[in-house]
Amino acid sequence: MKVANTKENLMKCICGNCPTYNECMKEKMEGLFCARGKATCALEKKGCICGECPVQSENDLDGMYYCNAGEAE
Ligand code: SF4
Ligand code: SF4
């Protein structure tokens, strides 16, 4: 299911607590990658906590690393 790019979903996004979330993403205020697509920042995979996120369960997603893989289908 496609994830809606809404302020509500952005508020629920927990990417900011993720070890992969880096300074560049923080500076650009990136997040909600499952809806908005890949990060514009270079990144190193250090774990993904999307599995613990309400947006993941509410939208029946089962993916990870949306910041690297792009938006959920
Ligand atoms: S599933 Fe991942 S990318 Fe999507 S809102 Fe949650 S933490 Fe952010
Ligand atoms: S999409 Fe997953 S790996 Fe990327 S920052 Fe969000 S929680 Fe971390």
Image (cartoon, rainbow, N blue to C red):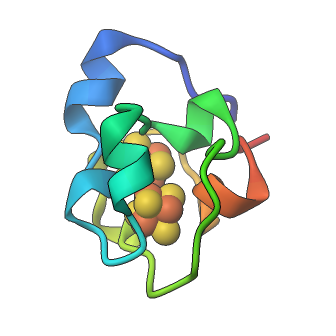
Q: Is residue 12 above or below residue 56?
A: above
Quadrant of residue 71 within the rendered picture: top right
58 lies left or right of 7 = right
Tell me if residue 42 can be seen. Answer: yes
The quadrant of the rendering that contains the N terminus is top right
Q: How many marks?
A: 0
Q: Is residue 69 above or below residue 44?
A: above
Which residue: 54% across, 18% down? 4
70 lies left or right of 54 = right
Q: Residue 56's x, y, as percent?
A: 44, 51
Q: Residue 61's x, y, as percent?
A: 58, 54
Residue situated in front as seen by the camera: 17 or 34: 17
Q: Is residue 18 above or below residue 30?
A: below
Q: Residue 66's x, y, as percent?
A: 63, 55
Q: Residue 12's x, y, as percent?
A: 23, 36
Residue situated in front as seen by the camera: 29 or 52: 29
Which residue: 44% across, 85% down? 47
The quadrant of the rendering that contains the C terminus is top right
Tell me if residue 56 can be seen. Answer: no
Q: Is residue 60 above or below residue 21?
A: above
Which residue: 21% across, 28% down? 11
3 lies left or right of 11 = right
Residue situated in front as seen by the camera: 30 or 2: 30
- Residue lying at the far bottom of the rendered structure: 46
